[in-house]
Image (spheres, rainbow, N blue to C red):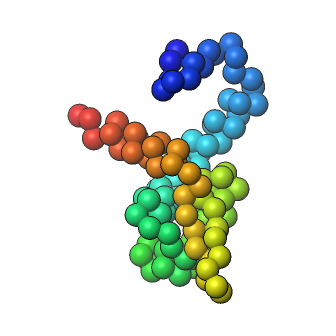
């Protein structure tokens, strides 16, 4: 099977790779986390801004961000006293965009 410019053969996949990939998709299996990722695709944001935009408590948003950070989908950056969250890399953006292309293809 060819994915992009890399070849992935099922026999080359290790059990741990499959586990990590499953965990990656589990993180995307929550509407709140997906919404956070969509917002971060537009701009970096702090917890209070995300909480306001989502209509959630800061504690609830912090919990979701912590899960996304552990899964390496977002990272933190400090700007003075403020901590902003951003997507880890462009791979996250591509996965979200491809997912949207898929569901909009009807």
Quarter-of-image position of residue 14: top right
Q: Which residue is located at x 68 percent, y 13 percent?
A: 11
* Residue toward you, 93 or 27: 93
Q: Is residue 51 left or right of residue 13?
A: left
**Residue 98, image quadrant:** top left
Frontmost residue, 57 versus 1 = 1
Residue 36 coordinates in the image, percent (x, y): 49, 63
Relative placement, left or right, of 44 versus 22 is left
How far from the left and from the top, in percent, is residue 53? 42, 75
Side (left or right) of 73 relative to 100:
right
In the rendered image, is residue 59 in sight? Answer: no
Q: Residue at 45% x, 43% y: name it.
A: 94
Where does residue 37 sit, x and y in percent of width and height?
48, 58
Hey, which residue is sitting farthest bottom in the picture?
Answer: 81
Q: Could you tell me residue 12's position as x and y percent?
A: 70, 16
Figure label count: 0
Q: Residue at x 52, y 53 (%)?
A: 30
Residue 84 makes an appearance in the image: yes
Q: Is residue 58 above or below residue 77?
A: below
Q: Which quadrant does the C terminus fall into? A: top left
Q: Is residue 33 above or below residue 45?
A: above
């Amino acid at each position: 099977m060819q994915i992009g410019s890399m070849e992935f053969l099922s026999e080359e996949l290790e059990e741990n790779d499959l586990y990590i990939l499953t965990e990656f998709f589990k993180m995307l299996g929550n509407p709140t986390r997906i919404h956070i990722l969509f917002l971060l695709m537009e701009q970096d944001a702090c917890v209070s801004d995300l909480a306001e935009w989502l209509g959630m408590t800061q504690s609830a948003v912090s919990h979701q961000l912590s899960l996304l950070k552990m899964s390496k989908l977002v990272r933190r950056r400090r700007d003075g006293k403020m901590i902003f969250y951003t997507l880890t890399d462009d791979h996250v953006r591509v996965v979200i965009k491809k997912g949207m292309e898929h569901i909009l293809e009807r």
